[in-house]
Image (cartoon, coloured by chain):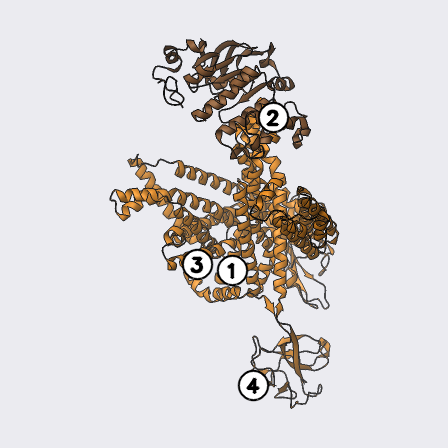
Chain colours: A orange, B brown
Amino acid sequence: MSASDKKQDPTLPAHRHLPPWQAALFSLVVPGSGQFVVGRRQRGVGLLLALIILSVLILWQGATALFAAVAIIWAWNIWDAWQLAGDHAMRLEVPVLLAAFVVYGVGIAATEIRPARFISGWPSVQPYLTALTQPELMEHPTKDIVGQVPIQIPCITPLPQPSKPASQNPKVTVNTRCAKVGDTITVTGDGFFPNFNGEMIWVNPIGDEQHVLENGRPMKFTTDAHGHFQVKIAVPLAVPVTSLPKPGETQTHLIRAEQHKPYGPLQPTRTLRLVLNKIGETIALAFIATILGMIFALPVSFLAARNLMGGNAVTRAIYYTVRTILNIVRSIETLMWAIVFAVWVGLGPFDGTLALFFHTIAALGKLYSEAIENIDPGPIEALRATGANGAQVVIYAVLPQFMPAFASFTLYRWDINLRMSTVIGLVSDAGIGFLIIQWIRLNRFNAMATAILAIVLGVAILDYVSAWLRHRIIVGNPTNAGRTLRSYVVTGVLIIGFIAAFIWSWNVAEINLVTFVEGAPAGVRMIRDFMTPDMFTRPTKKEAVDAVLPVPCGSGVGTPSAVSGSRVNLSLSCGNVGDKLTVIGHDLPPNTHVSVRWVFADGSYLRVKKDCCTTDSSGHLRLETKIHPLMAVNPKAGRAKPGKVEITWKEVIGPPHLSKAFNMVVNLSLVTLLMALIATTLGSAFAIPLSFFAARNIMGESVLGRTTYATFRTIFNLWRSVEPMILALVCAAWVGVGPFAGVMALAINNVPNLGKLFSETIEDIDNGPVEALMATGANKMQTLVFAIVPQLVPRFLAFILYQWDINIRMSTVIGYVGGGGIGQQFRLWVGLNQYADAGMAVWAIVAMVWSMDYISARSREKLV
Amino acid sequence: MLRVEHLTKVFPDGTVALKDVSFEVADGEFLAVIGLSGSGKSTLLRCINRLIDPTEGRVLWNDVDVTAAKGQELRHIRRQIGMIFQQFNLVKRSSVFTNVLSGRLGYASPWLSLVHQFTEEERQMALAALERVGIADKANNRADQLSGGQQQRVGIARALMQEPQLMLADEPVASLDPVLAHSILRYLEQLNREDGITVLCSLHFLDLVHRYATRVIGLKDGQLVFDGLPTELTAKKFKEVYGQEAEIVTVDGSGSGLMDHGE
């Protein structure tokens, strides 16, 4: 450390010699200034910046206890200045460790990590895990008996007739006609299969089915010899909060008892058939998006290749523009694009395909352009020298250099698209993810487990196939030898198979250009709103004018028409429901959006007209309408006094300031960065020890060693194929929705990913130093510390940075499924049509991903 | 004294690297080992300090059976035997000083050394070793910033930290140019003459063998085919060891040396 510090500033004037107490005094007042004046400028600025950043972080989370650490760094900085003035450099371990302590402390607070939730949340996640051992694969066909009885929730008086009937045979009865959520009710049934079990299903008013749970598990009942049963169940909260009945209303639910008696030979379950179907759709989406993305990325990549576009100012401008667009598109995750395109073309496979396709163009465009930039001009020159023409040069000198990179990048993208395609259904109706999220909502954990296991197997198998293909392409025979009949037949079959797969995928993906064109206005509007983020707002005050309107006449006193100032005049002073009414506003602010509404006596209100209205340039407004039925005075319904007609608008009262959405975005961006940081740290901490078990050279050639190696490798590969988005669903059930679940999901996913990379690094280490140290008589631990660890540290760090980079991208979307961070808010904003706010989240994500890309690329250059 | 008795090594893939090799090395000898690439030279040297376990036969070092030693005992034998390598086998990202100190690990405290703690005496010793090979000024450089010749000198300094009685040198100059080759071998010669360290060194060039070795053994297909003085190693004997197609070249490209086709 001291050596490198001394080397940093050879050009600066020699250290100014200050008495140590002066340097210390400087640093006491302004941290780092003492270091600065004795010539260690970088160190001084670094200390000051670090202290500022740490303090801001602490204040942000209000974790003031951590200021103790800041104080120690401050004290250390004074001592350091003293020492530096005496030409004595101190090591940086103390402040670095303390700074890390603060960052992690703040991170734990911000990401709401509560280890106690592992225990308290266990009962809710246990059914997920048990289900993984019981996928629904094969079953016997069944003879079914299904009976149902309605129940109304909550109780009101008078209780209306249920909107759905009870079944007659079999007969199901419940001991009450109505109940509230949480009540225990007794359900009896008759006319079922005797001495046989069955399950209880709860059907909500919308028709969603869920298992009735007992201790977190689906409830089973068993009938007696007469086909009779009786169970007690707790009334579940079966309706989303947004669809709960209004006060004074009730909803009809159904309690259903089902028995399924198997007979005959085994056959695939409906679940399995559904899963296989959707796995097919998943693969089709990834396939079509990769192929189309590849086709579109090729021309784009020429425009983004520096060596082709370096000619003149115009082409260089095109190069920079294309590069920038590619980078922006790339830094927005596929799942985010799926949400964007859902607004454009609606939910469905087409939406998913578009998202995958769009992201693929950007990613492949960049990779291809780099492959083009890396083409060696030597062979081109050599062929030109032989007199070859342009086409010949391309075929013999350019393509052979470009093809391997092209093929390998395309396959790499296919791997990614396949993984993405498994989770795109979490935000759209596309691919297997859709089934998973549906089944989780319905508490059908065994079905969910079937889907997850299908993903694990499917992805692992296709990974294997693509690894084989890649090997064939890269190691493959470069000559044109072996043009036999057989090779022609094989090629022909492959081409036909490819075309068939393409057509099938095209159909499955429901690609429909008409939808695309029709949806364009909505999409373009959204993108336009994205481009104008809502960073500033101006404080406003709500202004209102109103006039009382008694309905019917005589039920109250109307407001006499005012004659000056902002005012609302009505064409009637009183009237009956349905009468024509003209609302006229005078002296309102000109060209301003105002809202005209009925205000009822109980304080509630209704807009007179949707998307109404804008005043003219003289502040005048005129609106024709009919008197609304709720305006009628009706003491029984709580409207004892006459209502009013009101015009409201917002008046700007101050200078612009940062909007609430902007503050939220900044806040959530920090949370997102810290989520990624903590997840990477946790993932690495577990991956490092495990990776040694998956390294062939460490495990040795003994039977035990080889078995361990193979086991760990296989587990890593299978585990890797579960995307963090899916893990987040399970983690959200375990520890609750929020950043903690996101951190957990990312960390769990990082362990096998990093473990695999680490173990490959361990296999790649230079064995020479190990041999040399063993030859000196060093023991195993010493060899590890002196010969292996120094080789591993920089490469591990490089991979950890790379993973952090990926984690930041993932944590921008993991919130869609309950993982917290900025993604949760983005999805909410898009759902509320607040595109300007959503746009700000997008820009924040682009900024985060770019800066992290830059930092990690720079640091990796230094490390390796 | 080193005694090698009926040494045989068969690798798991069936390759027979050594076939019934027996010889003795007296204290203070500079023994050159010659032979084609793949003739078993490296395997022979590595069987002596048990980096490779021989299939059959024994190695006796000062009447202690190296082949039977285990654990602590083996490590104590190893620390008396220094070794330098063709590819230097330094930890490239560690400093030169750390690389040299790591030669002392067999003596150092097993626990303190894990946190890179060495005694002041050991540090002085490492500096002295670096001075002896003429690169004390490079102590704080990273090992991969040094040239090949300098890296090999770090390798020698590391071996010196063991205060060895025997030095195994596995083609120490095969990766170096002729001038550096001589300088490295001169260090080995100095250790051999001044400190009385026995040297076992595999070499490729006839002129180097003539210039430095006091005795030569030749291996062909894992068998001992020559054992004698360098002066007895005539062109005819050379052809026996290296095969009929071998051309005699020297380390600096002229005169009478020998390089096998594998290099």
Residue B53 position within the rendered picture, expressed as x and y whole percent measured from the top left: 55, 17
**Residue highlighted by disc 2:** B128
Q: Residues within 10 Å of mark 2 (few under 14, many from 20)?
A: some
Task: State the residue in front, A106 or A794.
Answer: A794
Under mark 3, the amino acid is Thr
Q: Position of residue A850 (x, y in %)?
A: 53, 53
Residue A321 marker: 3
Instruction: Answer yes or no: is residue B17 visible.
Output: no
Left or right of residue A62, residue B93 in this image: left
- Asked if disc 1 and disc 2 are in contact, CB closer than 8 Å, the reply is no
Give the residue pinned by disc 1: A340
* Name of the residue lying farthest toward the bottom: A563
Where disc 1 sits, the SS reads helix
Q: Quadrant of the C terminus of chain B?
A: top left
**SS state under label 2:** helix
Q: Earlier in the sequence, mark 1 or mark 3?
A: 3
Frontmost residue, A190 versus A420: A420
Q: CA distance from mark 2 to mark 3?
A: 61 Å
Please state which amino acid type lies under the numbered disc 1. Val
At label 4, the amino acid type is Ser
Mark 2, mark 3: which one is toward the viewer?
A: 2
Q: Mark 4 or mark 1: which comes first in sequence? A: 1
Select label 1 or label 2 by which is in front.
2
Does A839 appear above or below A196?
below
Check if mark 1 and mark 2 are on a common chain.
no
Q: Nearer the viewer, mark 1 or mark 3?
A: 3
Of the two numbered discs 4 and 3 on the same chain, state the one appearing first in sequence: 3
Neighbours of disc 3 within 10 Å: few (<14), some (14-19), many (20+) = some
Using the numbered discs, state the Cα–Cα distance from disc 4 to disc 1 in whole angstroms: 40 Å
